[in-house]
Image: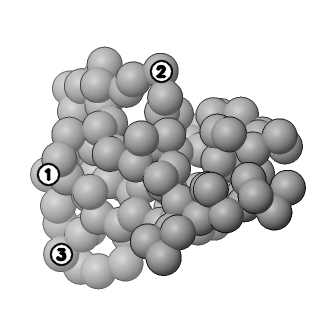
Amino acid sequence: DEAIAEQDWSIFGTTEQCCRCKSGTVGWSKSGKCSFCKGAVAKKKSVSSDCTASSKTFKGNQVCANSCKSVVGALLETAEEQQAAALLQTAEVQREEAAAMAEDEAIAEQ
């Protein structure tokens, strides 16, 4: 297990990331690219060891996406982010985010 932990973590953190988009969407990204944010990433953080895909105790995409709410925060931090979210949070953007999701990503449940 220590060898696996060393593989998943580096001085840069995990490949897998918790992501918060400027639209307010929170999710888990295996690749760390947060593609469901469509380039509008507000915050990214490394995940816990049980949310790295190669872990023997991997919890799964959806469970990890939901746990990302506590890691990157479901609430917007700044007035600027709140304004950006107001502009971006439309049904069309939400559909685009869902369409942009790859198999290696999941968006946290509301």
The secondary structure type at the circle numbered 2 is: loop
Query: In front: 50, or 73?
Result: 50
Residues under labels 2 and 3: Cα distance?
31 Å
Mark 2, other Cα within 10 Å: few <14 / some 14–19 / many ≥20: few
Mark 3, other Cα within 10 Å: few <14 / some 14–19 / many ≥20: few
**Residue type, label 2:** Glu
- The answer to whether mark 2 and mark 1 are in CB contact below 8 A is no
Q: Which mark is residue 80?
A: 3
Its colouring scheme is one colour
Residue 79: image x %, image y %?
24, 79
**Residue type, label 3:** Glu
Q: Which residue is mark 1?
A: 87
In the figure, 76 relative to 98: above or below? below
Residue 53 is left or right of residue 99, and the answer is right
In the figure, 5 relative to 99: above or below? below
Mark 1, other Cα within 10 Å: few <14 / some 14–19 / many ≥20: few
Q: Which residue is mark 2?
A: 103
Residues under labels 2 and 1: Cα distance?
27 Å
Q: Residue at x 29, y 25 (%)?
A: 100
The mark lying in front, picked from 2 and 3, is: 2
Q: Quadrant of the N terminus?
A: bottom right
Residue 74 is left or right of residue 88, and the answer is right
